[in-house]
Amino acid sequence: MPLPPAPAKRAALLSERDYDVPVARLPQTRKTASPLAEPGLTETPQARVVSEVTQAPATALADRSASRTRTPRASSSARKTQAEPDVQVQTPLFAPVPAPVPAPTRTQPPADIKPKKTKHNGAPKLFVLDTNVLLHDPMCLFRFEEHDIFLPMIVLEELDAHKKGTTEVARNARQTSRSLDALAGHQGTDITSGLPLNATGHREASGKLFFQTQLLDYTLPTSLPQGKADNQILGVVEALRQQQARQHKEPSTSAPDGGARPGAHEVVLVSKDINMRVKARALGLATDDYQNDKTLDDGDLLYSGAIALPANFWTSQAKTVESWQQGAYTFYRISGPIVASLLINQFVYFESPGEPSLYARVTEIRGKTAVFKTLKDYTHLKHAVWGVTSRNREQNFALNILMDPEIDFVTLTGQAGTGKTLMALASGLTQVLDDRRYTEIIVTRATVSVGEDIGFLPGTEEEKMGPWMGALDDNLEVLGKTDTSAGEWGRAATSELIRSRIKIKSMNFMRGRTFLNKYVIIDEAQNLTPKQMKTLITRAGPGTKIICMGNLAQIDTPYLTEGSSGLTYAVDRFKGWAHGGHITLARGERSRLADFASEVL
């Protein structure tokens, strides 16, 4: 069979009608003629090609090209025929409308093509930072978004004075100095015109950093000592405020009407020192506290871990609820608007007189449906944990997540006497000695005293931590008396066995460690900063469970509040995680005296 003849010219294998097919399928790619395009390459309308072609006169080609700016894009074959044969266009298909048509909006590029920028309310401000803000959070330089930052020279002097030592304050001072050095050493930066805060990769900070490079003229009341650092910072704020006010009043040559300069900033002092903020307000200066370190503005908004189902829950779910049995647990698949307010491992309960109660935990959320799993009843003696049974609803919730091997991180909050430490220890002893799920229990806590420090403590690490672990000894004494069948010798042997499986460690030596198959209890976690909390939680290795406990109403660490505590930070960040659980214990069970004192004192 002979081969077909070679094509005489390019693109001769397909007919011109075949070239029109894909163009007809994509009519939305209509474009207008670019003003930068060459005249010979002006786009032509889609044409139906006939068999007869004639040579097009130049005038007809020019007349047609004037009306092609509002027509669909032509095919490649139609552009090639412009220079050689003319094409006959069927006018009923793409004839231009004689009536005047307004210019389509597609001729202008849409605004959403440009990179999106975060919209901020109000004009950018100039924040003057106090030294205690930098010592509190070394990353605060990059937390002010589009606003500018000003550092007085006395602030750098105070940073230099606090950089020596091994304390957290000295560590933050050194970290702040390294950040300032990285910003100042970036190529192409001018310290007089401001250092861009996003030069080191922090894209969320779009403002600039200014240093005090010249003397500022200011006048303060004579009652304020001029040599004190706080008063010097107040003087800098006053001088900057006057300088910005003068710039705002001066006429701008760039403004078309010679009006005021639009670039004047509002000067705001940011300090953690309450007395300094009071003095600033007395002088008429704008001031504010550093709020970025607070996870929540109000402690009442903290995630509680449990939610009550509405009174009409069963009636509203009667037609859509699904239930099935799996072992000793019952599962319910529900739907409705309540699903949007649920989180994984959140406890739900339904209590109504005359109707069966429901206590369950959310195990799955998929779309508009959620799955509830009933709980194990630890109020019954047959389910006692090391002889301890729950006395209220929240304690039952807590024991369910403490005994669940799939939950790796548990946080317990509540007032004094709610049983946090006792339940955590009982669950740990059961899973270490009976279930052999973990190898040992590690107990640590923040060594922050309520009153004055008593000085150095002698002995080894565990002996030094002994006075801080009085709560552990008290709870171990309670747990040792739960086994009434054993004699005096049996209880003594059990006590020795328990203490051999409990290790007391100090937080000062946790850096770099890895816990494998350990049951870690962090007591008094409300006194930890978010950085310390992250350091402890990241020590967990495979098979390790961490329990954080604390009372947010008993914070003893200076400059730490309910909103900025590490315990609040952990509860807020871990909510909804498939392997984390939280519950807030409401009722005190220590004694009627302790319960009443927690309410009225």
Image (cartoon, grey):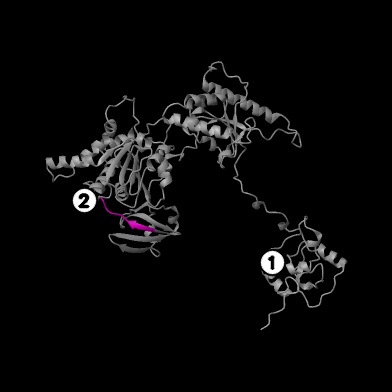
> Which of the pair 442/220 is nearer the observer?
442
- Quadrant of the frame with the C terminus: top left
Instruction: Identify the residue at horizontal 41%, vertical 48% (top origin).
Output: 575
The reply to whether residue 135 is in sight is: no
Name the secondary structure under disc 2: helix
N-terminal-most mark, 1 or 2: 1
Measured as percent of width and height from the top left, residue 258 is found at: 75, 33
Residue 265 in the image: above or below residue 334: above
Of residues 90 and 247, the one nearer the viewer is 90
- Is 484 situated above or below 159? below
Q: Quadrant of residue 151?
A: top right
Query: What span is in magenta?
Result: 371-378
In the rendered image, which quarter contains the N terminus? bottom right
Label tally: 2
Crowding at label 1, few (<14), some or many (≥20) Cα neighbours within 10 Å? few
Q: Residue furthest front?
A: 2
| Residue at point 14%, 43% (across, down) | 490
Q: Is residue 427 above or below residue 563?
A: below
* Residue 457 in picture, x, y percent from top left: 29, 27
Indicate yes or no whether the magenta region holds residue 424: no
Q: Is residue 69 visible?
A: yes
- Estimate how packed mark 2 is, as few (under 14), some (14 to 19) or many (20 or more) residues with alpha carbons within 10 Å: few
Q: Amino acid at mark 2?
A: Leu
Give the residue pinned by disc 1.
Answer: 27
| Residue carrying label 2 | 381
| CA distance for labels 1 and 2 | 76 Å
Q: Position of residue 251 (x, y in %)?
A: 73, 31
- Could you tell me residue 346's position as x and y percent? 38, 51
- Quadrant assignment, res 182: top right
- The extreme bottom residue here reads 1
Looking at the picture, which amino acid does disc 1 mark?
Pro
